Image (cartoon, rainbow, N blue to C red):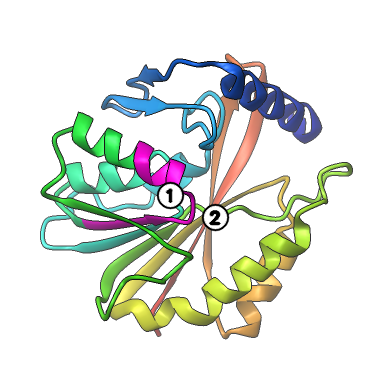
């Protein structure tokens, strides 16, 4: 049974608990060591499925590909791509996230394959273009009681949709994440305003040690 409200209550409590912790936590649930800390959204498959929804759409072999990871957070998607052979540029608006992604890049011995910058969406990228762009952005939530930042999320996504295809190489692809409890109708309307017709894939995951089941979505579209 899908229980979106229970899931959102769970993740908010878990985030608050992490913020109160002084020490970092390191886990290997994505197949490599990843540190999480208070102040950065905690990437862990028991807590969130948006990184997994994006990772599931990445090629298994990525040698020779250039990937841009926007909203990198802990760096989990950037590290996955680099381990598969990609050259990665990762960015986040939060300096706390940039520091954590840098730590995790060093922890996995990938400093020669991942460049990390602080920036708002595409700022600070010079004239580079990419084969793949991943975006684990905040998305608007439609569950009652979780609507405070809806407009902020939609405005950020609108800026992303307006600009993203300029940064793709010919034939390049964008992958972004959402969830069933998101306002997916509003997200798709935002895409349609910019001529984007995405493919959608559903990934069902359990959280809170198997107590909660949630559908996570990936949207992908190309440069054309």
Q: Residue at x 15, y 41 (%)?
A: 110
The spot of residue 178 in percent (x, y) is: 60, 51
Circle number at residue 137: 2
Please tell me whether mark 2 sits on a helix, a strand or a loop. Answer: loop
Magenta stretch encompasses residue 129: no
Compare residues 74 and 174 and report the one nearer the observer. 74
Res. 92 image quadrant: bottom left
For the residues labelled 1 and 2, the Cα–Cα distance comes to 11 Å
Q: Residue at x 51, y 37 (%)?
A: 40
Compare residues 157 and 179 and report the one nearer the observer. 157
Sequence order check: which comes first, mark 1 or mark 2? 1
Along the horizontal axis of the image, is 9 left or right of 137?
right
Please tell me whether mark 1 sits on a helix, a strand or a loop. Answer: helix
Which quadrant does the C terminus fall into? bottom left
Q: Is residue 22 above or below residue 120?
A: above
Circle number at residue 54: 1
Compare residues 169 and 216 and report the one nearer the observer. 169
Whether residue 75 is visible: no
Q: Residues within 10 Å of mark 2 (few under 14, many from 20)?
A: many
The residue stretch that appears in magenta: 88-100
Q: Residue furthest right?
A: 144
Magenta stretch encompasses residue 93: yes
Circle number at residue 41: none
The spot of residue 71 in percent (x, y) is: 46, 53
Q: Is residue 172 above or below residue 95?
A: below
């Amino acid at each position: 049974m899908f229980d979106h409200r229970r899931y959102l209550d769970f993740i908010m409590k878990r985030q608050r608990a992490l913020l109160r912790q002084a020490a970092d936590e390191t886990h290997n649930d994505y197949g490599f060591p990843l540190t999480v800390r208070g102040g950065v959204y905690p990437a862990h498959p028991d807590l969130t499925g948006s990184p997994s929804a994006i990772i599931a759409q990445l090629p298994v072999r990525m040698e020779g590909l250039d990937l841009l990871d926007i909203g990198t957070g802990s760096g989990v998607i950037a590290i996955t791509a680099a381990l598969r052979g990609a050259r990665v540029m990762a960015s986040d608006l939060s300096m706390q996230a940039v520091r954590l992604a840098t730590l995790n890049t060093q922890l996995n011995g990938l400093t020669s394959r991942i460049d990390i910058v602080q920036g708002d969406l595409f700022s600070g990228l010079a004239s580079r273009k990419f084969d793949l762009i991943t975006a684990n952005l905040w998305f608007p939530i439609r569950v009652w009681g979780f609507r405070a930042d809806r407009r902020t999320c939609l405005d950020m996504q609108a800026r992303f949709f307006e600009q993203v295809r300029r940064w793709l190489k010919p034939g390049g692809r964008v992958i972004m994440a959402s969830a069933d409890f998101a306002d997916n109708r509003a997200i798709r309307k935002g895409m349609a305003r910019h001529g984007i017709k995405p493919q959608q894939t559903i990934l069902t995951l359990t959280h809170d040690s198997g107590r909660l089941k949630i559908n996570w979505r990936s949207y992908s579209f190309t440069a054309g």
